[in-house]
Image (tube, rainbow, N blue to C red):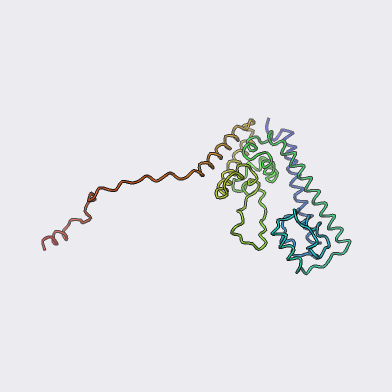
Amino acid sequence: MVLEDDPEYQLIVDCNALSVDIENEIVIIHNFIREKYRLKFPELESLVHHPIDYARVVKRIANEMDLTLVDLEGLLPSAIIMVVSVTASTTSGKPLPEDVLQKTIDACDRALTLDSSKKKVLDFVESRMGYIAPNLSAIVGSAVAAKLMGTAGGLSSLAKMPACNVQLLGAKKKNLAGFSTATSQFRVGYIEQTEIFQSTPPSLRMRACRLLASKSTLAARVDSTRGDPSGSVGRKLREEVSKKIEKWQEPPPAKQPKPLPVPDSEPKKKRGGRRLRKMKER
């Protein structure tokens, strides 16, 4: 059976389309929340980029002007919490009117509900990945495979994508909050959630990521043509990746001691010729 005609595959594609629609809806709501909350805390949007994190923080702060009374623990990393608190103490914002605040909080609730619905849809897709994309799931795991497929917009779209783009699927914009960029990690998408990537030493992770992306693209192409429903190609590719990463970690071969050259075995550097003969005559 052609994969595109399979009703279950159709359902998975529809689920992926639905999760993309939900994502777009969340972005629209995020823009609405930002517009309203800008009057109260204009700097917050530049400190918290992710729409869901932003909605949670706005809901938690509400109209409170003194952020020392608001516990943001668990919503954001501690470094960002510190920056948000310091910025809030010098902000030019004013408390929102009650009706505007209510609308903003409702929008936050709606964004969070949409996010949990999107998680449910992705969980369902994840549970069916072993059937739809056995080879891709064998390399990166069904959870990451579902996310890659959802973000790309279906298995055939993922198969047509170059590996360098697959590597960046799901990469978030990094917020450094004024800290140095030297220590910030390179941009990696969902591939960093794979077991292979996590078990690789940090110095080799960028190479491992590139390798995983290229092999995942190959596996997606096999799956999109229904080339191997058993998933053995995926397992083989996974073994290849593991072996390569192990090879990178081996110490370089020891240098062989070189014997010294035979003394005076080199030919003389002087060339013959008219000048040399004249010199000898003199």
Q: Nearer the viewer, residue 79 or 273?
A: 79
Examine the image and state in which quarter residue 100 appears: bottom right
Look at 74% across and 34% down and name the residue there: 8
For the image shown, how many numbered marks are present on the structure? 0
Look at 72% across and 33% down and name the residue there: 6
Vertical order, 11 against 90 (above or below):
above
Residue 222 is situated, as x and y percent measured from the top left of the image, at: 61, 36
- Name, please, the residue furthest toward the right: 99
Examine the image and state in which quarter residue 78 appears: bottom right
Is residue 43 rendered to the left or right of residue 157? right
Q: Nearer the viewer, residue 227 or 187?
A: 187
Is residue 258 rendered to the left or right of residue 173? left
Residue 147 is situated, as x and y percent measured from the top left of the image, at: 69, 44
Residue 43 is situated, as x and y percent measured from the top left of the image, at: 74, 64
Q: Nearer the viewer, residue 14 or 80?
A: 80
Is residue 114 rendered to the left or right of residue 278? right
Which quarter of the rendering shows the C terminus?
A: bottom left
Which quarter of the rendering shows the N terminus?
A: top right
Residue 257 is situated, as x and y percent measured from the top left of the image, at: 35, 46
